[in-house]
């Protein structure tokens, strides 16, 4: 009954940051950072900063800590010309289609913690999502070019701007290109490709996720991908870009569903892998099933990163003798076993759990048309694992009534299996290691805590792409 999870990231080493447009009242705080960061002849005066905030407020974004203290900012102005020259950078043209970034500054005490990168990414995400600007331009000293490339910019040329003795490089980020959505295909509950349960994850902007009629488009994407689930994820709001609060929806090729474990694992894995959110803090997914929390953890080798999901326990339903007799008889036929092979049959939420002997487990032959006649959404067949195995129990999941004859690895089934095994075993364990023995197969670490089941698994990215509309 091991639950070998070592640690998660110490919270003390990082600063929680949020990003929002700066207010006029914060001009003095911005000025203090400006003065501390630039030589006297380059730093803007308080009056200049106040007028920037008034004129180009949509393009003046601040980074704040959890006490609402300003840690840094990005400022930019619009221009009508695509090439950055001295004149295009000196004033704000409210009708300009090109955004010129002037500074990305983080206050001295908060540097070298990745705040500038998150701030610039959040800035770019907001601008791209608004759809007003066609390209974002900036000039940078050569030693900073790699920083801007890591935020999505590409180098276009040596800048004609002369400013001090150093050469300047011109960089650009094309907004139409940046609007193309990333799709990531992830094998969830897998330690290597082609294992576990695959899901597609579409990472969206706040605007695209909340667009009217988006459900129809999401359904089309799920049909096109034809995986058991396609997940759609976006920051909770503009102010949450770069943070750990997200909206999440799941679609099968047939419909939207209310809860999905493996696609949530796939989504959390994608957000961590692609640098969208922080590893040291949990992610909160706002879903049709309420807020689901996931956490980044390391397994006991201290190297393998895994994701722990906090899910609701599925409750056992009461049943009478008549139900038990008829269900057993139906399961004997549907699984091609004998009555003596069955140790217990229980009704948990939408599923029947059929606990069989280890030898019968190896010999079952599911008949999906017979399983589909049972008065449940799915049948979970389970048995205790061998004493010398690293697992506590194994299972298979059959759901012809929900469009999947056999599911490779099913997170939600374990929200029923965990309370079942907790009650069945005399020692009432709360920690389990389990394997779903489908053709692909996958491992889960499980923990029961009150009315919650914590499911932990690893995941592997197998494909990354861009959606071209
Ligand atoms: C903002 O941009 C202008 C250039 O238009 C620059 O002079 C100024 O230093 C930047 N910073 C602030 C805080 O306004
Ligand atoms: C979609 O997937 C299902 C189940 O895996 C399969 O039966 C079906 O043929 C697939 N459809 C297409 C168009 O590939
Ligand atoms: C993992 O890290 C912990 C704490 O740093 C340490 O006590 C433990 O020995 C490490 N385990 C392995 C397998 O390296
Ligand atoms: C499933 O059971 C039905 C009814 O007994 C039978 O007609 C059918 O041939 C079975 N299917 C398979 C694949 O065995
Ligand atoms: C279950 O696992 C948790 C988390 O690793 C651990 O703190 C707890 O002591 C374990 N409980 C038992 C009864 O082994």
Image (cartoon, rainbow, N blue to C red):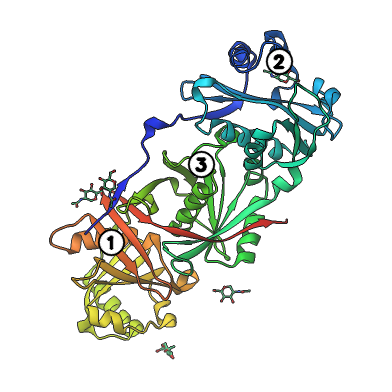
Q: Residue furthest left?
A: 426
Q: Against 169, is 378 above or below?
A: below
Q: Which mark is residue 216?
A: none
- Residue at point 25%, 66% (across, down): 390
Mark 1 and mark 2: span between their CA atoms? 61 Å
Q: Residues within 10 Å of mark 2 (few under 14, many from 20)?
A: few
Q: Secondary structure at mark 1?
A: strand
Locate residue 260, reporting x and y percent: 46, 57
Q: Residue furthest front?
A: 165
Left or right of 209: which side holds 169? right
Q: Residues within 10 Å of mark 1 (few under 14, many from 20)?
A: many
Along the line of sight, which residue is nearer the eye, 61 or 105? 105
Q: Nearer the viewer, mark 1 or mark 2?
A: 2
Q: Which mark is residue 277?
A: 3
- Can the viewer see residue 91 in this picture? no
Write down the quadrant of residue 295 in the picture: top left
Q: Against 377, is 44 above or below?
A: above
Q: Secondary structure at mark 3?
A: loop
Mark 1 touches mark 3? (CB < 8 Å): no
Q: Which mark is residue 433?
A: 1
Q: Looking at mark 2, is its residue's CB closer than 8 Å to ligand 1?
A: yes
Mark 1 and mark 3: span between their CA atoms? 28 Å
Mark 1 or mark 3: whose residue is earlier in sequence:
3
Locate residue 357, reporting x and y percent: 22, 78
> Splitting the image into four quadrants, where does ligand 1 fall?
top right
Write down the quadrant of residue 371 in the picture: bottom left
Q: Which residue is mark 2?
A: 42
Which quadrant: the C terminus? bottom right
Which quadrant: the N terminus? bottom left
Along the line of sight, which residue is nearer the eye, 425 or 85? 85
Q: Against 280, is 352 above or below?
A: below
């Amino acid at each position: 009954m091991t639950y070998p999870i070592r640690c998660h990231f110490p919270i003390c080493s990082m600063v929680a940051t949020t990003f929002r447009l700066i207010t006029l009242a914060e001009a003095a705080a911005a000025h203090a950072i400006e003065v501390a960061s630039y030589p006297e002849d380059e730093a803007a005066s308080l009056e200049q900063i106040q007028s920037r905030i008034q004129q180009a407020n949509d393009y003046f974004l601040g980074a704040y800590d959890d006490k609402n203290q300003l840690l840094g900012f990005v400022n930019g102005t619009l221009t009508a010309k695509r090439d950055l020259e001295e004149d295009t950078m000196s004033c704000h043209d409210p009708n300009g289609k090109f955004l010129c970034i002037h500074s990305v500054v983080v206050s001295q005490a908060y540097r070298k913690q990745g705040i500038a990168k998150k701030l610039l990414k959040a800035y770019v995400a907001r601008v791209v999502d608004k759809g007003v600007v066609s390209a974002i331009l900036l000039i940078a000293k050569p030693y900073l070019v790699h920083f801007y490339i890591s935020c999505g910019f590409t180098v276009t040329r040596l800048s004609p701007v002369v400013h001090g003795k150093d050469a300047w490089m011109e960089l650009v980020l094309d907004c139409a290109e940046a609007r193309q959505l990333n799709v990531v295909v992830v094998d969830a509950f897998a330690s290597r490709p082609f294992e576990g349960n695959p899901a597609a994850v579409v990472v969206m902007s706040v605007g695209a996720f909340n667009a009217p009629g988006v459900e129809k488009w999401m359904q089309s994407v799920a049909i096109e991908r034809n995986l058991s689930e396609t997940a759609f994820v976006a920051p909770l709001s503009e102010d949450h870009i770069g943070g750990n609060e997200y909206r999440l929806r799941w679609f099968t090729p047939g419909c939207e569903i209310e809860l999905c474990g493996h696609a949530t694992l796939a989504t959390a894995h994608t957000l961590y892998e692609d640098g969208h959110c922080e590893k040291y803090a949990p992610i909160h997914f706002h879903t049709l099933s309420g807020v689901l929390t996931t956490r980044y953890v390391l397994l006991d080798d201290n190297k393998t990163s895994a994701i722990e999901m906090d899910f609701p326990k599925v409750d056992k339903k009461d049943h009478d003798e008549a139900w038990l007799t008829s269900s057993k008889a139906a399961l004997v036929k549907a699984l091609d076993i004998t009555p003596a092979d069955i140790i217990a049959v229980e009704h948990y939420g939408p599923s029947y759990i059929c606990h069989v002997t280890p030898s019968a487990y190896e010999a079952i032959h599911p008949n999906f048309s017979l399983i589909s006649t049972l008065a449940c959404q799915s049948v979970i067949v389970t048995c205790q694992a061998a004493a010398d195995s690293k697992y506590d129990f194994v299972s298979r999941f059959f759901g012809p009534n929900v469009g999947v004859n056999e599911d490779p690895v099913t997170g939600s089934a374990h929200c029923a299996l965990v309370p079942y095994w907790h009650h069945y075993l005399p020692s009432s364990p709360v920690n389990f290691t389990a394997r779903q023995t489908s053709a692909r197969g996958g491992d889960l670490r499980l923990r029961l805590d009150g009315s919650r089941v914590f499911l932990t698994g690893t995941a592997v990215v197998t494909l990354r792409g861009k959606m071209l509309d």
